[in-house]
Image (cartoon, helix red, strand yellow):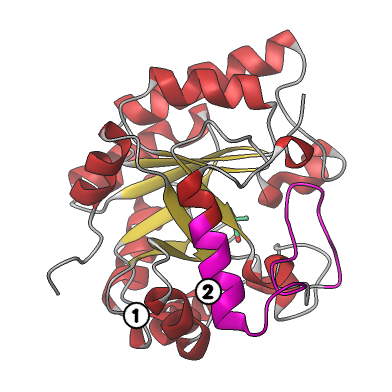
Amino acid sequence: MKDKVTIIRLQEMKQAREKIASLTAYDAGFARILDEAGVDILLVGDSLGMVLHGDETTLRVRMVDMIYHTRLVKAGTRRAMIIGDMPFMSYTTPAQALGNAARLMSEGGAELVKLEGGRSQVETVSHLVNQGIPVCAHLGLTPQSIHKFGGYRVQGRDDASAAQIRTDAKALRDAGAALLVLECVPHLLAAEITAGLDIPVIGIGAGADCDGQVLVLYDMLGISGRQPRFSRNYLENAQSIRVAVKNYVDDVKAGRFPAAEHQFE
Ligand code: KIV
C-alpha cells in the first residue's frame, strides 16, 4: 500500500514535526476502524490483560495471547504500523527475547516489538536489532514493574529518577531502538527527552511535546471502567466509535490533545 506507515515514515514525521497518532488495538474489527480513521500506529499492548481479560495488572499475559491478538489486528490493518508487546518475563535474556520477538513477527505479524525497561534491556535491544528485529523501547511507568513501583505512579519526578530516565533513553537509542514510548512522566522531562533524541517519542501521560501520543483504546472509548487523568473519553460527545477515533486523531495531529489537564508536573 502506497501510504503504509513504516519506520522511515515515522522518522520523516518527527523531522517535519507532524504528530503521530497511536492507539492500542486487540482485534480485527477495531483495527479496521482505527486504520481507516488514520491512526498511524496500532499497538497490540499487553494492556489487553487488564481491558480484555479483566485482570488488575498486565502480568498474566502470555506469548500465546500476544501472538493471537497481534494476528487479529494484522488481519484488520492495511496502513498503520503494528507494534506487538513483549509480555512479562518473555525477554529476560537476549536469547529468550529473540525467540519470542521472532514469533511475534512471524506468527503474529508485528512489524516492531515493544519491551519495557532501561539499562537492563540495552543488550537485548542491541541483540534484536542486530538480528533485524526493530524495537520500540518503553520507559517511565512501565506496568510490568508495577509491584516494584508500589502502584501506578508518575515516574521521573525527583532529580535522580529523571536523570535515570534521560540516561536510559539515550542508551536504548544507542542500542538501536527505533521508537520510544514514555509513560506517565512530567511533561518537561518528556519534552527534553523528545528534543534530544533523533527517534520518535510517543507519549502517554507525558505531555504535548512528544512526537506522538498513544492511549489505551478502551480508556478513550470510556469502556475500560477507569478514566486515567491523562486520557480522555472521546466517545462521550461522538455519535459513533468511528467519529470518536477520528476526533482523537484530529486532536493529536492539531496539538489539541493532550491538553494541560492531561499532563503531569
Ligand atoms: O500495553 C499497553 O497498552 C501499553 C501502552 C499503555 C503504552 O504499553
- Callout 2: SS: loop
Which residues lie in the magenta part? 225-250
**Residue at (70%, 23%) from the top-left corner?**
156
Mark 2–mark 1 CB contact (< 8 Å): yes
Give the image quadrant in which the ligand numbered 1 is located: bottom right
Amino acid type, callout 1: Thr
**Foreground of the two, 131 or 143:** 143
- Please rate how many residues cluster around mark 1, counting C-alpha atoms within 10 Å: few if below 14, some from 14 to 19, many from 20: many
| Residue picked out by circle 2 | 25
In the rendered structure, the answer to whether residue 29 lies left or right of residue 172 reads right
Residue 237 appears anywhere in the view:
yes
On screen, residue 126 above or below 68: above
Amino acid type of the residue that numbered disc 2 sits on in the rendered structure: Ala
| Residue shown at the point (70%, 26%) measured from the top left | 186
Q: Is residue 115 left or right of residue 155?
A: left
To which residue does mark 1 refer? 77
Q: Is residue 176 magenta?
A: no
At mark 1, the secondary structure is: loop
Query: Where does the N terminus fall, quadrant-wise?
Result: bottom left
Q: Main secondary structure of the magenta part?
A: loop
Vertical placement of residue 171 versus 126, above or below: above
Q: Could you say where residue 145 lies in the image, as x and y percent from the top left?
A: 71, 45
Q: Quadrant of residue 263?
A: top right
Q: Which mark is residue 241?
A: none
Quarter holding the C terminus is top right
Which mark is first along the chain, 1 or 2? 2
Q: Is residue 76 found left or right of 259 in the rendered image?
A: left
Q: Is mark 2 within 8 Å of ligand 1?
A: no
